[in-house]
Image (cartoon, grey):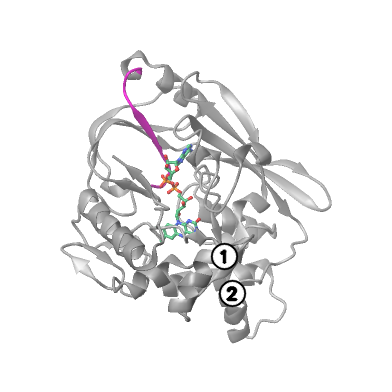
């Protein structure tokens, strides 16, 4: 394994974040091995320099140039850790592309992540917010991960419990934020997959296609079709998918809102209620609004877009105005799902 790394200075990040923000990193370095990462973290030149870890840049917003070291995760590899009659456990490098892993698994007939098809980004970032879509979350197949501690360079292992997964959440967005670099993830997939078609849009799509007993390949294809019809492609228009999390509110607050807005959609979330952020934003009239090159997507109120040359600050100002208007009208706080880097 190589321990070498090369540092680039004043590096334009526009090709490294799906919002297409042309922020500059003071230093930028891609790492292809754990050893290279450890050497970089120990390098005396960067001991007093802030650092930020990046995978595919599909869930970050740079508000301004980053006066520090951006580390780009590029550790590759998919290998079988264990296999029995029922399950197969994979070790996957954090720099692998998530969707490629899904396609690889579907092709091999290993089930569990087909509902998470076409989510952009890297495998290493998937546990950070416990990625989820179409009725499935990463934690359902997650076994453990390995991560290097930024301060000591030590490699540590975290099991599922230690990751404290929640809705678009984990310990790495909270207590351990910025303290560990995930280098590899272990996932347990099924060799005789049980498909999950519980999500309404997915079951409707399968019915529309006349598929009664879907295979994991059918599920993956259906999810890809739905996503391509609903979400803007970052290759065509800069975006980070859902900008905000769906707020989870108390039953009392929901009942009060429902008495004023009888059409308000909702989903149960334990003893609380989840309300679609897209509906709240749409009700406030933001869908399709454009201010210079920053805007709210015309089909999807939850997606903030960069029509070309918007700055991170312009996107963030728009996001904050949306937060204020939703708070004023509904009394509900919207929390960004996107990681804001300033
Ligand atoms: C069009 C579109 C659709 C999307 N749909 C979904 C969806 O359906 N469900 C969903 O959950 N998400 C979705 N997302 C969000 C995004 O794809 C996921 O959050 C993804 O996991 C981010 O991966 P990334 O490699 O791009 O992470 P980045 O954007 O590079 O980083 C995200 C965060 O993770 C940290 N990080 C990244 N890699 C590491 C590492 N190796 N070690 C430690 N920290 C790290 C970063 O510091 C940052 O805080 C969507 C995004 C887009 C653009």
Chief secondary structure of the magenta portion:
loop
Q: Quadrant of residue 296?
A: bottom left
- 201 or 260: which is nearer to us? 260
Residue 78 in the image, given as x and y percentages of width and height: 60, 43
Q: Quadrant of the C terminus?
A: top left
Q: Is mark 2 within 8 Å of ligand 1?
A: no
Instruction: In the rendered view, tell whether residue 178 sits above or below residue 121.
Output: above
Which residue, given by chain and number where applicable, does mark 2 sit on?
A: 202
The magenta-colored residue range is 47-57
* In the rendered image, the vertical position of residue 111 relative to residue 139, given as above or below: below
Q: Position of residue 85 (x, y in %)?
A: 84, 52
Q: Residues within 10 Å of mark 2 (few under 14, many from 20)?
A: many
Residue 167 location (% of width, % of height) = 55, 53
- How crowded pointer 1 is (Cα within 10 Å; few <14, some 14-19, many 20+) is rated as some
User: Tag on residue 251?
Assistant: 1
Task: Determine whether the residue tagged by mark 2 lies in a helix, strand or loop.
Answer: helix
* In the image, residue 55 lies in the stretch drawn in magenta: yes
Residue lying farthest top? 44
Q: Residue at x 63, y 56 (%)?
A: 105
- Does the magenta segment cover residue 289? no
Indicate left or right for 141 with 244 as reference. right
Q: Secondary structure at mark 1?
A: helix
Quadrant of the rendered image containing residue 314 = bottom left
Image position, residue 274 (x, y; %): 53, 64
């Amino acid at each position: 394994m190589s321990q070498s790394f090369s540092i680039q200075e004043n590096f334009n990040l526009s090709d490294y974040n799906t919002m297409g923000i042309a922020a500059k990193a003071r230093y930028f370095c891609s790492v292809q091995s754990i050893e290279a990462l450890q050497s970089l973290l120990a390098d005396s030149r960067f001991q007093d320099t802030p650092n930020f870890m990046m995978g595919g840049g599909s869930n970050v917003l740079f508000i301004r140039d980053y006066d520090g070291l951006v580390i780009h995760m590029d550790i590759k590899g998919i290998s079988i850790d264990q296999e029995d009659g029922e399950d197969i456990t994979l070790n996957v490098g954090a720099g692998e592309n998530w969707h490629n892993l899904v396609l690889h698994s579907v092709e091999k007939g290993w089930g569990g992540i087909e509902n998470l098809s076409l989510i952009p980004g890297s495998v290493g970032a998937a546990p950070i917010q416990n990625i989820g879509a179409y009725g499935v979350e990463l934690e359902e197949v997650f076994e453990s991960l390995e991560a290097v501690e930024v301060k000591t360079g030590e490699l540590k292992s975290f099991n599922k419990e230690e990751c404290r997964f929640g809705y678009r959440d984990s310990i790495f967005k909270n207590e351990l934020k910025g303290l560990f670099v995930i280098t590899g993830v272990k996932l347990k997939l099924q060799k005789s997959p049980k498909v999950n078609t519980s999500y309404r849009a997915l079951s409707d799509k399968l019915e529309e296609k006349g598929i009664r007993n879907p295979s994991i390949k059918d599920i993956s294809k259906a999810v890809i079709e739905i996503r391509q019809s609903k979400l803007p492609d970052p290759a065509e228009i800069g975006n980070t998918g859902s900008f905000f999390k769906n707020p989870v509110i108390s039953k009392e607050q929901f009942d009060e809102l429902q008495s004023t807005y009888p059409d308000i959609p909702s989903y149960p979330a334990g003893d609380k209620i989840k309300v679609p952020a897209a509906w709240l934003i749409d009700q406030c009239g933001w869908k399709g609004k454009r201010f210079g090159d920053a805007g709210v997507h015309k089909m999807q109120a939850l997606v903030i877009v960069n029509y070309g040359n918007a700055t991170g600050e312009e996107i963030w100002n728009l996001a904050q105005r949306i937060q204020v208007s939703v708070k004023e009208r509904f009394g509900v706080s919207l929390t960004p799902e996107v990681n804001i880097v300033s």
